[in-house]
Image (cartoon, coloured by chain):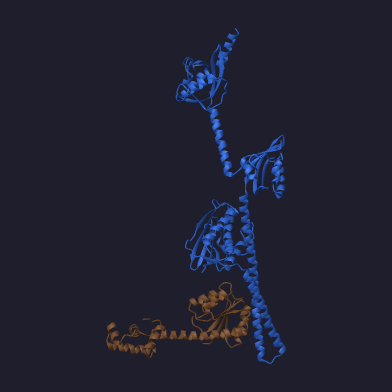
Chain colours: A blue, B brown
Amino acid sequence: MIRRLDHLSFHALFNIAADALLLVDAEGKILVSNPSAQAFLGYSPEEMQHMCVEQLIPERLRDRHVHYRQHYLAKPEKRTMGQGADLLALARDGRELPVDIGLSPIMVEGERYVLITFIDALERRRAQAALRESEERLRLAKRAAGLGVFDRDLLRDTVTLDARAREILGLEEDAVVTPEQLMAQVHPEDDALRRSALKQAMNPHGTGEYYLEYRNSQSSAPERWVAASGQVFFEDDEPVRIVGTLQDITERKAMKQAFRDHQADIDAALKRQAASQTASAMAHELNQPLAALSAYSEVALHELEKTACSDQLKRALQGCIEQSHRAGRTLHELLEYLHEGEPGLEAIDLNVLVRETLTLARAEGLIQFNSVLEPYLHLPLVQGNRLQLQKVIANLIRNGLEAMRDAGVENPTITIRTSQKGNKAMVTVQDSGPGFHPDTATRIFEPFFTTKSRGMGMGLSISRALVEAGGGLLWADPEAGPGATFHFTLPLAS
Amino acid sequence: MMDAVYIIDDDPAVRDSLALMISQEGLIVEAFERAEDFLNFVPQHCRGCAIVDIYMPTMDGMALQESLLERQVTLPIIFLTGHGEIPMSVRAIKAGAVDFLTKPITRERLMSSIRTALMLSEKVYDQAMKAETTRHRLDDLTEREREVMSLAILGQSNKEIARHLGISHRTVEIHKAKIMHKTGATNLLELARLAQEGGIVP
């Protein structure tokens, strides 16, 4: 009775199981199949009975399967699903179906049977492939950006770093690392910044975003600039974990610094030049009345000499003349001294200078813009001061960029052309902005004239002064639109 | 025509004081504030000299010198400058400037420069006038006389000229006599020189 009950319950379970089930004997012959198995493989119960399991396997794999089956029966043990390689079942209509298979050996009255469980593995394999792909993509993205990953458990006070993160922080690949150790590596000057960034990120009412650029100083490796970007996770308003990435930004920082240094150098040099030029202009201005004083005195003395006049008067006028010349000599010495400080002139390839200045303008990052360069390739070298010319071109580019930004121009474009006009070289800078009214074309060079909300309006008047000091001309061309167009000329070197 | 000294300087006090000083020497002085004004005024041939300030706002002294050369104005130039820049003074002198003086300037230094300039001007002016007269004389020649003259100064004999132009020996002789009379030349060598001065180059 028990055996019968057992028998019944086995059948009931066997038939209602959602998994496909087959009971096979030691020869691999199918004794019973359940409806799930029949439906999955497309056979009727009658067809299924007495089939050999190998018939349910793609032909090319059958020989190997016989070998496996015999090997299994020699040492049967329970094998759960999903183990081993990707398995395939052959349906009645010839389709090959990915399956997961489980094996359970059963002994009945000294006979060995095997219960085969299998399920459709298509979905699982698809999901697995998708997961693999996405992991691969993440890995590639991380590698491309050179990102390292950190994961800090705030409750247990532990931190996990991937290989790249360790590399960035200058740590051994398998060394045990504690959060304290990492904090100790933060440059002392950046530690206050780190604390405040962390405090802000750990605020349960904030976004939980963490960002910090700091110097990682470690005795065994050179100092590196690191950008840490992460997200804090909260449980019941309690920060429990920060996960994020690390990036080595040393080079980016160095480039930015170099750019700033370069700008500072230019500004300082121009300031010195402006001061020297102002002093020089004032010395010239003083020299004019001095020349007149001296000449007037000589005129007076000459007139007096025609008549009999007092010696004192003559002496006084003589003194006027001598003192004027004395003051003149001092002024000339001053001018000579200032002249030494004046910018040196050099032979410059304008096409190269224009290209360099465009690169600088881009690095300044005011806005993204297109640039069109139309160089006159046979342009001879010009005579000028490199710093000043760069400032002039940069000013014109910046004016164009600001005008296009303020007007919200789409595809902002700066076009720079070089050409030769007789014994002068000409540079034309044109933007794709709204341009300017012919009336403003002359006024824009006045000091303090500006159409912008910001700025002093000194850019163009300084640029014009610099160009004219170098023997050239700078003017606006309202006819050449669309967009604002400026030309300036420079003498050729030779 | 009297010698005149032209002052071109944008500074009124400099203009005035120098004008006074130069007029004390008995010279005619004319002063101009702008180089452009002087250019409009100055004839191609005149006697005198120009005292020109290097630094002027619209057209500077060097540009004025260039324009004068372009117009073949032969007036000698003395440059005045606030402080002497050697490269610029070299350029100015090479382009024919008489002197390059630094302000403030003494009467002595200025007058010595002016005297040199006036002497130069006289020479240049005389030459120019002579050339002008020659050109006028040559202008009186007929087309045929010019032809005869250009062949004669090449050294061709009357016979050769006659054959060349397809005219009689006698006609050539008459033309030649007229040429000598009109130009005032006394011999062939003088005629050749006149032809060169007057721009008839064989």
The one nearer the camera, A76 or A341, is A76
Q: Is residue B35 above or below residue A10?
A: below
Q: Is residue A479 left or right of residue A172?
A: left
Q: Quadrant of residue A132?
A: top right
Q: Is residue A485 visible?
A: no
Question: Which of the pair B132/A269 is nearer the observer?
Answer: A269
Q: How many marks?
A: 0
Nearer to us in this view, A71 or A26: A71
Q: Relative to A57, is A361 above or below?
A: below
Q: Nearer the viewer, residue A235 or A400?
A: A235
Q: Residue furthest front?
A: A74
Q: Is residue A1 left or right of residue B96?
A: right
Up-down relation of residue A357 to residue B58 (above or below): above
Provide residue B103's location: percent of width, then percent of height.
62, 79
Residue A130, located in which quarter of the rendered image? top right
Q: Is residue A407 above or below residue A34?
A: below
The percent coordinates of residue B123 (x first, y second) are 49, 86
Residue placed farthest to the bottom in the image? A308
* In this picture, residue B114 sits left or right of residue A150: left
Question: Which x, y percent locates residue A381?
Answer: 51, 65
| Residue A187 visible in the shown view | yes
Q: Quadrant of the C terminus of chain B?
A: bottom left
List x then y, in percent, for residue B125: 49, 85
